[in-house]
Amino acid sequence: MNKNYSCLLLLLPFLIACHHNPLDINVSGIQINLQIGRLDQDLFAVTPANIGQMVPSLRNKYDPFFSYYNREILAIGDSRDSLYAGYLLTFLKDSTVTKAHLRADSLYRNFQPYGRQLEQAFKHYRYYFPSLPIPIIITYLSGYNQSIVTTPEALGISLDNYLGANCPFYRQLGYPIYKKEHMVPAKMVYDAMYGWASRQFEFNGKSDNLVSGMVYEGKLIYLLDALMPDGPDSLKIGYSKVQLDWCKAHETEMWNYLIEKKMLFSGDRMGMVRFINPAPFTAAFGQKSPGRTGVWIGWQIVKSYMKKNRNVTVKGLMEENDYHKVLNESGYSPD
C-alpha cells in the first residue's frame, strides 16, 4: 500500500472529528407528541349562521390560547361578551383580512413541511431540556400584529406575517424593505423557536448594559444552532449571505469600535437599541452594515465561550445568567 495513502487513512478519523459539529446529534430515538392547531382555518369557518355554535367549540378546542387571542391579539374582548360576535364577524369580513387568509391558505394549506421542521427542533429541545414542557403550536391570522406569541402552554404563529417578501399587502401597508425580507415562509420556524426560547430563558442579568444584551441575544441564537443544527446561519439571525460576509470581514473593526467608545459596559438604552434592535443597518458602521450587529457579535462571543469551555452543556449555557462571566471566559478576541 502506498505510504502516503496509509498516512491519509490514519489521519481521516482525526480530520472528520475536527470538522464534526458537536451540536449535530441524532434525535431519531426521541419521541414527542407535537400538537398543531390550525386556528386560522377553524376561525374562518365561522359564519353569521353558525357563530353561536362555532365560538363555544373554538373556545373548548383552543382555550386558554383562544381567550388570549381575542383579548390581546385581535383586541375584541372576551368571547362570552354580548358584543363579541359582531366584532369577530367584522374582523372576518375585513377585506385586508380575507385577502390575507386566501394567500395564507394557498401557502400553508399543507402545513406538514413546517410541522416536520418544528418537530425536529423540539426533539432537539427535548434532548437538551428533558424536563421542560413542549407547547402546542397554534397558527392564526393576527391582522398583521405580532408574528410570534407565547403563553405558558402555547406557541402561536401569525401566518399573515409570513406571506413572502414580495407580498403586495406589505407594500400597501408601507413596511420597509428590511422588515419585508424577514416575512417569508423560510423564516417562520426560526422565529417561532427563537420566540419560545426567549420565553423559557428570559433576560436575567445582573447588569443591564450593552454587552449583557449582546451575550443574552447571542445565547438565543446559539440555542437555534443547537435546535436546528442543519439550518443556515442566515435564517437564524435574519441576514443575507452578503450581510453575513460583511460582518465576518468587519468583525475586528466593530469590536474595536465598541471598546474604544467604551460602549460595552454602558447602560445607555439608546446605545443598546442601536446595536441590538432590528434596523436596516447599524448607523455606527455605515449603510452597508446590517442591523443587529451587536447580536451577531454576541453570537460569536458565545460560540467562542462554548468552544473554549467544552464542559459547559447547552443547558448550562442557557442557565448561565452572568453575561460578563461568559464574555470573560470566552477568550473572544477577533483577529
Image (cartoon, grey):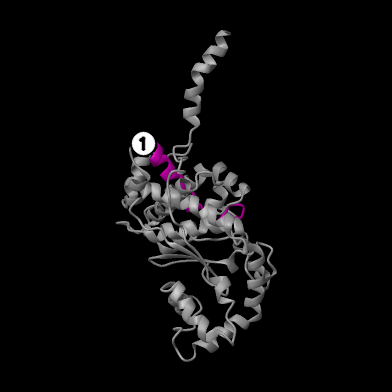
Residue visible at 55% across and 61% down in the picture: 279
On screen, 123 above or below 7? below
Q: Is residue 217 visible?
A: yes
269 inside magenta stretch:
no
Q: Horizontal and vertical percent for residue 111?
A: 58, 60
Q: Nearer the viewer, residue 130 or 229?
A: 130
Q: Looking at the picture, how far across and down is residue 87, in whole percent?
A: 54, 86
Residue 94 x, y percent position in the rendering: 63, 82
Q: Quadrant of the N terminus?
A: top right
Residue at image coords 44%, 86%: 80
Query: 86 above or below 65?
Result: below
The front one of 30 and 229 is: 30
In this view, the residue farthest toward the left is: 206
Element assignment for label 1 = loop
The magenta span reads 287-308
Residue 295 is inside the magenta segment: yes
Taking the image as shown, residue 141 lies to the left or right of residue 261, namely: right
Secondary structure mostly seen in the magenta stretch = helix
In this view, 226 is above or below 88: above
For mark 1, what is the residue?
A: 310
Q: List x then y, in percent, for residue 30.
A: 42, 46
Q: How many marks?
A: 1
Crowd class of label 1 (few under 14; some 14 to 19; many from 20; radius 10 Å):
few
Q: Say what amino acid the circle numbered 1 marks.
A: Arg
Residue at 45 percent across and 46 percent down: it is 226
- Horizontal side of 174 relative to 29 (left or right) equals right
* The one of 16 and 319 positioned closer to us in this rendering: 16
Relative depth, front residue between 31 and 144: 31
As drawn, is 80 to the left or to the right of 284? left
Q: Residue at x 51, y 69 (%)?
A: 146
Q: Point out the residue furthest to the bottom here.
A: 82
